[in-house]
Image (cartoon, coloured by chain):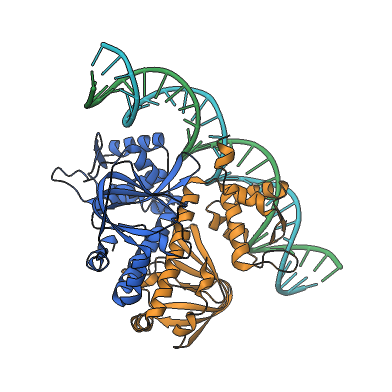
Chain colours: A blue, B orange, C cyan, D green
DNA sequence: CGCGGTTTTGAACTAAGTCAAAAACCGTGG
DNA sequence: CCACGGTTTTTGACTTAGTTCAAAACCGCG
């Protein structure tokens, strides 16, 4: 289903090994900069986001070890359309666009896998567009939690294996800091989730998924 | 930049010619249905959209002659994630997924072009996500008008060569019928656009583009 | 113990959605 | 040519979800 499918075919492009290290808070590349390479994440967490004005942003997705980002720079336009910022110290394998393109030229199988990967991304993107346009905030937060659960899994204690700032969570859900709380509060009261400082645990998956499908309740 | 780049490489896949005709209002395929083929549009206009509940939808994009749609059905999941509805009677060339996949297997160049096309789509999608999440309605409408201008061009009279229902325009901008009006009214008053029944003309492109960049005004 | 950064809460405000009803518009058939 | 019923457009008044602003509480950490 999701970007885990990226496994397997990636080693092929990691021939040209240029390891780059980045520290928490560092910006790996920025919207508008000339795109010169893509990154394969060996360790750490990165957020990929798009700015709006000085202080507003929408986080498009989070990348963890084993995933890659920066490939958006490959299309016709030659500048990065997004920014990548380090959330947890990371080690990346950098591949220049030139090299990557040559690899694509040479390796048909890789191209197919890469295409398939992007078709899935597109599907996700389109679902998210709809959510941002039509769903209410609480639903988008529920959605995000389910996504995080799926992408990062849970620890022994049942809490999602990723600790984000509320600021970032809000920026992913497409809302403000404050609104994010109030909604999280409600979700806790409703018994859908449990929160301990920066940790989130899903208690009642059904209740969260329900928000993905409010149509039924709204029209009744 | 955009899907015009689809030209050229499409003929390759139009070998298997199964012409299908659809009338205005017909649904070509529906969200959730098993995806069995993709469509190359020879004539007419199609809207590709995603439902939310019974009566809400977000239009993802419009396709005109020369473009193709339904390719979202190619990814891992085997159901269409979107619905395609005919806006103007159309003639399509239908290509089964099987055949298309085989063609992809065999034709590396096509795969590369197809990949590139989708990278561009993804870029557009991500920009739109940000717009839906952070931009105000008027800005999204401005954006839509610029998009329509670009995709469909203008006639001798300067009006955009596509007549949509306001309902659909609203559904593309991610807002309601009524709000759409009020905003269009304002745009007219501001001298940015001109409206004659179903026709829209852009008068002051700068003013529209300005809404794409409100950051400057907001922070001042 | 005080300081900078988060998190929480409260209250005022606003953009946009909803509802409802009037006006314009459009084809169709008498 | 006009009356009609249906659809689309327009306008107005009201409601509300979500944002904004501002101040309090909390929480490590030197």
Identify the residue at horizontal 19%, vertical 48% (top origin): A154
Q: Nearer the viewer, residue A27 or B104?
A: A27
Identify the residue at horizontal 37%, vertical 69% (top origin): A101
Percent position (x, y) of residue A90? 25, 48
Q: Quadrant of residue A1?
A: bottom left
B112 in relation to B166, above or below: below
Identify the residue at horizontal 61%, vertical 51% (top origin): B209
Identify the residue at horizontal 37%, vertical 74% (top origin): B35
Q: Nearer the viewer, residue A34 or B147?
A: A34
Percent position (x, y) of residue B4? 54, 71
Percent position (x, y) of residue C27? 71, 71
B185 in relation to B158, above or below: above
From the viewer's perspective, is A153 left or right of A209?
A: left
Question: Considering the image in quadrants, where does the C terminus of chain B appear?
Answer: top right
From the viewer's perspective, is A147 left or right of B193?
A: left
Q: Is residue A195 visible?
A: yes
The residue positioned farthest toward the left in the image shown: A156
Q: Quadrant of residue A184?
A: top left
D24 in relation to A201, above or below: above
Percent position (x, y) of residue A150? 25, 54
From the viewer's perspective, is A15 left or right of B149?
A: left
Q: Nearer the viewer, residue B185 or A220?
A: B185
């Amino acid at each position: 289903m999701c970007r885990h499918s990226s496994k397997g075919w990636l080693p092929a492009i990691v021939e040209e090994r240029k390891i780059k290290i980045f520290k928490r808070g560092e910006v790996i590349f920025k919207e508008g900069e000339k795109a010169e390479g893509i990154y394969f994440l060996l360790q750490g967490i990165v957020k990929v986001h798009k700015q709006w004005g000085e202080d507003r942003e929408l986080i498009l997705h989070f990348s963890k070890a084993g995933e890659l980002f920066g490939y958006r720079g490959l299309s016709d336009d030659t500048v990065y359309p997004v920014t990548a910022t380090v959330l947890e110290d990371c080690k990346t394998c950098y591949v220049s666009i030139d090299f990557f393109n040559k690899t694509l030229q040479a390796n048909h199988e890789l191209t197919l896998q890469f295409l398939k990967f992007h078709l899935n991304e597109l599907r996700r993107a389109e679902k998210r567009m709809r959510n941002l346009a039509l769903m209410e905030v609480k639903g988008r937060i529920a959605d995000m939690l389910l996504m995080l659960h799926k992408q990062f899994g849970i620890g022994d204690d049942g809490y999602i294996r990723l600790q984000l700032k509320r600021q970032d969570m809000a920026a992913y859900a497409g809302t403000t800091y404050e609104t994010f709380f109030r909604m999280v509060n409600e979700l806790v009261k409703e018994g859908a989730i449990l929160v301990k400082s920066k940790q989130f645990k899903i208690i009642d998956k059904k209740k969260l998924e329900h928000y993905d499908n409010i149509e039924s309740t709204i029209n009744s």
